Amino acid sequence: MKNVNKISPIKLIKISLTIVFILFFTNNLFSQDCILPNGKYKIEFDYQFEKYPKFEFRILTDTIIFYQNDTKIKRKIEKNFDCSLVIEKEKVDETNLTYFQKMLNKQDLFYTFKKINNSKFEFIYRVDLHVMINSGKFIKLKE
């Protein structure tokens, strides 16, 4: 505690600002490299979600196209930057839903990328920063 009192207030402010700038710029540098680029991908879920149905999708600038079996679903991409991916929600008829189901339907689901290695994008699919739906990898396919 005596050592802390020996540091001048100006030096303490400089140290604090330096730490903040380093954290800020490190985060910005990382976030610029974690955009899901155009192309075709397959999904590989983590072990605890391995029974979830597998699917493939294609990113075309501001559109995502999901392929599962013979089905093709097209959605707008609302956000594809800052290490996250937000996709337009599916319209749901809420007439027969309970209050709780209606509240859940209002949530905006999104993917956050936690690690990127060449053509593998490790993700967490979330309701918010505390609630996870699933996790796994988007693997970019060669076309």
Image (spheres, helix red, strand yellow):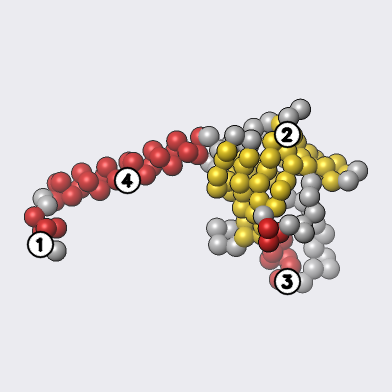
**Residue drawn at x 25%, y 48% as measured from the top left:** 16
Cβ atoms under marks 4 and 2 closer than 8 Å: no
Q: Secondary structure at mark 2?
A: loop
Query: What is the secondary structure assignment of the residue under circle 1?
Result: helix
Residue type, label 1: Lys
Check residue 20 in the rendering and tell me which mark sits there, or answer none.
4
Q: Which residue is mark 1?
A: 2
Q: Position of residue 123 (x, y in %)?
A: 62, 49
Mark 2 Cα shell of 10 Å, populated few (<14), some (14-19), many (≥20)? few
Upstream in the sequence, badge 3 or badge 4?
4
Sequence order check: which comes first, mark 4 or mark 2?
4
The answer to which quarter of the image holds residue 26 is: top left
Identify the residue at horizontal 27%, vertical 42% (top origin). Answer: 18
Measuring 88% from the left and 46% from the top, which residue is drawn there? 69
Q: Amino acid at mark 2?
A: Leu
From the image, state whether disc 3 or disc 2 is nearer to you.
2
Q: Can I make out residue 124 in this image?
A: yes
* Chain-order first, disc 3 or disc 1: 1
Of the residues shown, which amino acid type is indicated by label 4? Val
The image position of residue 57, as x and y in percent, is 76, 40
The x and y percentages for residue 59 are 71, 35
* Of the two numbered discs 3 and 1 in the rendering, the one whose residue sits closer to the viewer: 1
**Would residue 125 be visible to someone looking at this image?**
no
User: Helix, strand or loop at disc 4?
Assistant: helix
Disc 1 crowd, CA 10 A, few/some/many (<14, 14-19, 20+):
few
User: Disc 2 to disc 1, how far (Cα)?
Assistant: 59 Å
Disc 2 marks which residue?
A: 141
Q: Which mark is residue 28?
A: none
130 vs 78, left or right, is left
Verify CB contact (< 8 Å) between mark 3 and mark 2.
no
Residue at x-position 66% and y-position 46%: 137
